[in-house]
Image (cartoon, helix red, strand yellow):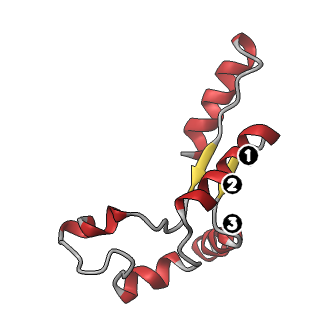
Amino acid sequence: MGSLSEAFRAQLAGTHPNLRVVVVYPGRIATDFGLNAMGERMADAGTLPAEVLAVLGGATQTAAEVAHVVCDAALSGRGDIYTQPNAFARVREYMDRQSA
């Protein structure tokens, strides 16, 4: 997504300078999506398998919390956003381990 969004930003900059591209990287969101996620119906939509939780980390956010972060990003002109408070640091750690 990073390369695609950067290319889109560069393309729009010359023709539509007032448009912004915001990429949202959400964490877990408390919705009914989990009822049919992972190819199987889960009894509790808020419960994910332990191996999935270990990778995702962070707390489950409400849809309203995520919407607030997205609106703030759109209004402030920020580019890429992670809705989970420490998600960027976790992604950076992962990328650093991959390049080591």
Indicate whether 29 appears above or below 93: above
* 3 relative position to 73: left or right: left
The image quadrant of residue 35 is bottom left
Indicate whether 64 appears above or below 79: below
- Select label 3 or label 1 by which is in front: 1
SS for dot 3: helix
- Select label 2 or label 3 by which is in front: 2
Label 1: which residue? 73
Q: Are marks 3 and 1 in contact (CB under 8 Å)?
A: no
SS for dot 2: helix
Label 2: which residue? 69
Q: Residue 38, percent across and down? A: 26, 69
Q: Residue at x 59, y 78 (%)?
A: 58
The disc labelled 2 sits on which kind of residue? Val
- Spatial separation of the CA atoms under disc 2 and disc 3: 14 Å
The front one of 83 and 93 is: 83
Q: Are marks 1 and 2 in contact (CB under 8 Å)?
A: yes
Graded by Cα atoms within 10 Å as few (under 14), some (14 to 19) or many (20 or more), the crowding at tag 3 reads: some
Q: Residue 88, percent across and down? A: 69, 66
Q: Residue at x 55, y 59 (%)?
A: 26
The image quadrant of residue 10 is top right
Label 3: which residue? 88
Specify which label sits upstream in the sequence, 2 or 3. 2
The image quadrant of residue 75 is top right
Indicate whether 66 appears above or below 61: above
Graded by Cα atoms within 10 Å as few (under 14), some (14 to 19) or many (20 or more), the crowding at tag 1 reads: some
